[in-house]
Image: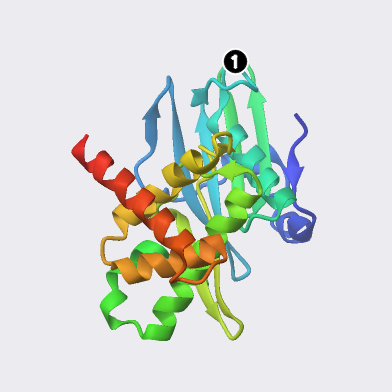
Amino acid sequence: MTDYLASEDVALLQRHGLNDFEALWSLQLEAVDEPNTGRGGWSSVYRLELEGKGYYLKRQADYLTRTLHAPFGEPTFSREFRNIRRYQTLGIPALQAVFYGQRKDREAHRAMLLTRALDDWRDLDGLLAQWPELGDAQRDGILRACGQLARTLHGAGQVHGCFYPKHIFLRERRSGWQAQLIDLEKTRPLLFGRRDRLKDLEPLMRRARVWNEGELRLLLAAYLDQPADSAVVGDWQQHLLRRHREKGAR
């Protein structure tokens, strides 16, 4: 496939000689964590700073997955990149790709994905750790933003597959809280109505243990675009709690 390079970042990357695959591949950087190994290869993530702008550069070799799109295997980044572009087309707030490319030769099947860092955003995991210290308006804004994000996602016919606090990023603006998603590799079409929607929402509730039932109702009210005290919200809450209990029992 042809390499992808976001038009907004072309000039910046060109100034640093980093506007092609091999230049980015050979760039010496410190990995932000231990590489993932398995699948017959490796995958690693690096932090890149250029003129005050932050990026994350992900490189992998022979780190493949089988999909309907590629039954004989493709780099996992290829699927993630397609999903990033799909989210952009569908208007689902999510991380943005700057560069994507892959090469297959005798040595390895390599792939590389460069995304913009979310330096002025905070992940929901960190906000949950500070939940008792947040004001009521902040809590309400965060809950509403998460509910609206889920509504946009499912309204576009997509299931995230890992709708966890660490994959939801938020920031506060004068107009209110904004939310977006990262880690789109497991995204798939929403096929089974409420069952799929509950399956996507339950992991968020399970990991946000600090939320009480009233706060969960507020999130669901934003998700369903209904008053928090409505019967519809109450019904969804009961189904979500039932699924949570069944998950815990298993």
Closer-to-camera residue (84/193): 193
Closer-to-camera residue (162/101): 162
Residue at 34 percent of width and 71 percent of height: 214
Q: Does residue 158 sit above or below 136 in this rendering?
A: above
Q: Does residue 123 sit above or below 7 in this rendering?
A: below
Residue at 49 percent of width and 40 percent of height: 196
Question: What is the count of numbered marks?
Answer: 1
The answer to whether one can see residue 162 in this image is: no
Give x and y (percent) for residue 96.
Answer: 64, 54
The answer to whether one can see residue 114 in this image is: yes
Residue at 43 percent of width and 19 percent of height: 40
Residue at 26 percent of width and 78 percent of height: 132
Q: Residues within 10 Å of mark 1 (few under 14, many from 20)?
A: few
Disc 1 designates what residue? Answer: 71
Q: Residue furthest toward the front?
A: 231
Give x and y (percent) for residue 45.
Answer: 47, 46
Provide the secondary structure element on which disc 1 rests.
Answer: loop
Q: Does residue 172 sit above or below 248 in this rendering?
A: below
Give x and y (percent) for residue 125.
Answer: 35, 62
Position of the C terminus by quadrant:
top left
Asked whether, in this view, residue 174 is left or right of residue 137, the answer is right
Closer-to-camera residue (97/47): 97
Position of the N terminus by quadrant:
top right
Give x and y (percent) for residue 227.
Answer: 51, 71
Determine the image quadrant of residue 209: bottom left
Q: Residue furthest toward the left?
A: 249
**Colour mapping:** rainbow
Closer-to-camera residue (235/135): 235
Amino acid type at circle 1 is: Pro
